[in-house]
Each structure stands twice: as C-alpha cells, then as structure tokens.
Image (spheres, helix red, strand yellow):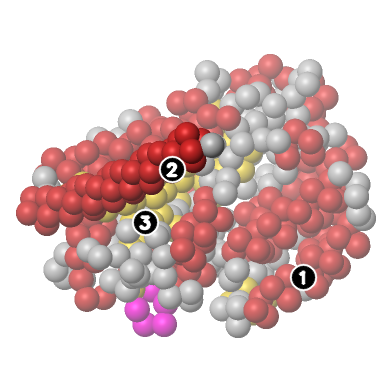
Amino acid sequence: MKKIVSLVIMLSFILIISACSNSNNTAQDGQQGSDQASKDNESEQTDGKIELRMTWWGGQERHDRTLKVIELYEEKNPHVKITPEYSGMDGYFDKLTTQFAAGNAPDIIQYGGNLNDFVHRDVVLPLDDYIGKELDVSLHDESMVDAGSFDGKFYGVTLGTNAWGVLLNKTLFEEAGVALPGEEWTWEEFEDIAAQLSESLDGIYGTEYFDQNGFGIFIDQRGKVLHENGVLGIDLQDIEDWYQMWEDYRVSGAVVLPEIQAASSQTPEQSMLVAREVAMQLIPSNLLGAYTNASQDELVFHIHPYNKETGRNGVGLRPSQFLAGYAETKHPEEVAKFLDFMVNDKEATEILGNDRGAPVNSEVREHLISVADEVDSAIFSYIDWVSRTSDAPYVPNLPGYNETEALFKTTSEEIAFGQTTVKEGSERYWKELNATLDKYK
C-alpha cells in the first residue's frame, strides 16, 4: 500500500514539473514571437519601406498590364512596395464592402460608376490637398475631373474615357451568311439580325441579353435620364417596355438561353462571345483589345442600335473606371503619387494602353495615338464616332449600386426563366428600387 501511495506521489510530482516546463516553454515561445514582431517592426521603420495594397477587377490582360505598371513604379520608387489584390468583377464590390466594414480595405482602389456610392459612405480619400503637388490634373478633360468630384471635393482620377457599343463576331456573321448592320440600325433590325444568326448557326445565338448597362442606353434613347442624384427620371412603363422587348426577343429565338447567360463570366477570356455561344455582345470600348486578343475570330466594334422614333443611339462618353484612395490609408501622399503615375506617366500609360479607356490626359492621349496599334486605333475611332453622333449625358450608377444592380439582375433572370411575368416582375422591381433609393437619400 505504501508503495502505491509513493508511486502516486511520484507521478503527480512528475506531472507538475512537466506542466511547469510546458508553461515556461509556451511563455518563451510567445516572448520569442513578440520579440520577432518587434524586430520586424523596427526593420520596417529603419529601412523606410512604404507598403501599399492595390485592388482592381478585370481580365487577365488588364491584370498583366497593371502588374507591369506596379513594377515600373517600384523601380522608380524603391522605397515603395505595392501588394496587388486583383480578381474578376464577380463579387468584387461585396468583398470591398466587407473590407471597409472591417477597417482593412486596400490603400488604392479601382471603382466604376459607383464611386459616388462609396464617397457617401465616407470611405474614399479626398484628394484636393494633393492636387498641384503629388497629383496633377491640369491636362485632364474637365468633364472627367467633374465626374470624379462630389459636393465640391475631388475623390478619384478617371482612368480612361470609353463608350458602350456592340461587339460583333464578324467570323460568325460570315458563317451564317448575314450582313453586318449599318451605322444607324434600329432595335427592330437588331432583333431581325439576331434571329437570323440564331437560326443559321448551330448551337450559337444571335445576341446576349444587354443587362443594366443596356437599360441605361435604352432610357437615354427615350430622351430621359435614369436618375439625377438618386431621383428617378423614369417610370414603371419604361421598365415594362424594356423587359417586354427582351421577352419578345426570346420568343423569336434572337437571344441566348437564360441558363447560358446566367452561367457566363464577365471576363473577356471566358465570355460568351469568345466561347462562340453568341455572335453579339454589349461591351465598353476599353475592353475591345482584351476580347480581340482572347478570340481567334475577327471582331468588329459597332454602335448600339438606335431608337427609330427618337433617332437617338443613347451612347455617350463616360469614365471607364476611377482610381481612388482609402480614407483610412496611412500613406495618403504616396497614394496620390501613384494615382498621378497611373494617368500621367508616359511609360505607364503606354503599358496600360486603352485597356481602361482613352486617356484623359491630353498629352498622353496624343502620344498614344501616335504609337497606336490597329486595335487602339479602332478604339480611338469609335470614341470619335460617339462624340460626333450622340449628346447623351454622363449618368453615374444608381446609389446603392450593389443592391440596385443585383435587383435588376435578379428581376431579369426571374422573367427570363419564366418564374414571373413581365408585368409582375416590373412592378416588383419598381417598388423595391424606390425603397432602395430611399435608403440612400
């Protein structure tokens, strides 16, 4: 019995020593980790390295071009390290919204026509204090400076000017024996051409559905403005007419099946047109190069169908994207310097080309025209075409862009899949759209 007691005491003693040893080791490991973190912090402070994060969306060609510009900036500014965070368009703003909520958004951020939405959330860095010093906009088109300004403050440099148009797969047109449209084709001609393509091409459809961007053009063709500072300039009938028009196209076989469109990618390399699922697709002019490089077919960029009653094509010049800073960045001056580099440096802008649109800096634009290849020349010609044929104003995206865009997409798919009627879907969209906009007033 005494032996058993002695054994228990001995085992307990061993366990206590072991526990103390583990505790000491853990404390030492934690201290070592803390010491290493301190050393890392000291190293960052002593080597003077500024670290920034930059996020954008796009296809592979845009990623490659942007990465080269970042490398060039780092070569010219060895004290700066920029970590890229890029992706496709799908989920981009959802992720960004989550990062803002967590307070860890990137320092440099690419926006679309929804810059105003984020400015009103107070997460975008005002740039007025850096104009004339770190950032020069003196040679930028005044309209594009205005496009990046809200409530008297400047928030984002315009990365390029572009215009929407219809990308035609000329190779598929020739295979179908269908002639390319004229310069002033109408919606009625568009439907007829698309139906002919669908009928003549096995498993290939005439056109994709034109989504919310096409709807904005459709509204302008009617002599209306989608909204002004969140106040709608349309009515329920406009919405019903849009959805009914595309429902008629489905009946005629002109438009791609909804299940194909719903599963499609927004990146040029995986698009329906490049995959030869459709022969016509609505794209912004700055993506012409990416589509051309991704396809083996011959592509032609064409003006949008006109409204035959008003004679308007509804296509106007607009900023392609904006580049802006995070309001909570620790290095606002360096952010402003990089924004300046992206839009004013001739080496950088030559790398970027027209991927984000025609440059807004007049000297840069003249330089790029002088060295333009065939695709870039086509983009410049199209921008000139639009400037001569349309007086459509620039209309920013609706406030609450993520919500309103998702609402439009969901309504479009429910109607296309036959889950609701055009009338019911339009009425619900109208009601929910107004409720969403009320939240942002």
Q: Is residue 140 left or right of residue 265?
A: left
Residue farthest left in this picture: 46
Q: Is residue 399 visible?
A: yes
Q: Is 8 rendered above or below residue 326?
A: above
- Which sits earlier in the primary sequence, circle 1 or circle 2? 2
Q: Are marks 1 and 2 in contact (CB under 8 Å)?
A: no
Dividing the picture into quadrants, the one containing residue 206 is top right
Residue type (three-letter) at the residue carrying disc 2 = Ile
Label 1 belongs to which residue?
A: 432
Please report the residue visible at 60 percent of the width from the left and 68 percent of the height from the top.
400
Q: Secondary structure at mark 1?
A: helix
Q: Position of residue 201 (x, y in %)?
A: 76, 20
Q: Position of residue 170 (x, y in %)?
A: 60, 25
Q: Quadrant of the N terminus?
A: top right
How many circles with numbers are drawn on the protein?
3
- Which sits earlier in the primary sequence, circle 1 or circle 3? 3
Label 3 belongs to which residue?
A: 106
Start-end of magenta stretch: 148-153
Q: Secondary structure at mark 3?
A: loop
Q: Quadrant of the C terminus?
A: bottom right
Q: Is 266 rendered above or below residue 342?
A: above
Q: Position of residue 142 (x, y in %)?
A: 33, 69
* 131 part of magenta stretch: no
Residue farthest front in this picture: 2
Q: Secondary structure at mark 2?
A: helix
How packed mark 1 is, by other alpha carbons closer than 10 Å (few <14, some 14-19, many 20 or more), is some
Q: Is 249 rendered above or below residue 341?
A: above
Please report the residue visible at 35 percent of the width from the left and 33 percent of the height from the top.
64
Please report the residue visible at 33 percent of the width from the left and 63 percent of the height from the top.
325
Nearest the eye: 180 or 327: 327
Label 2 belongs to which residue?
A: 9
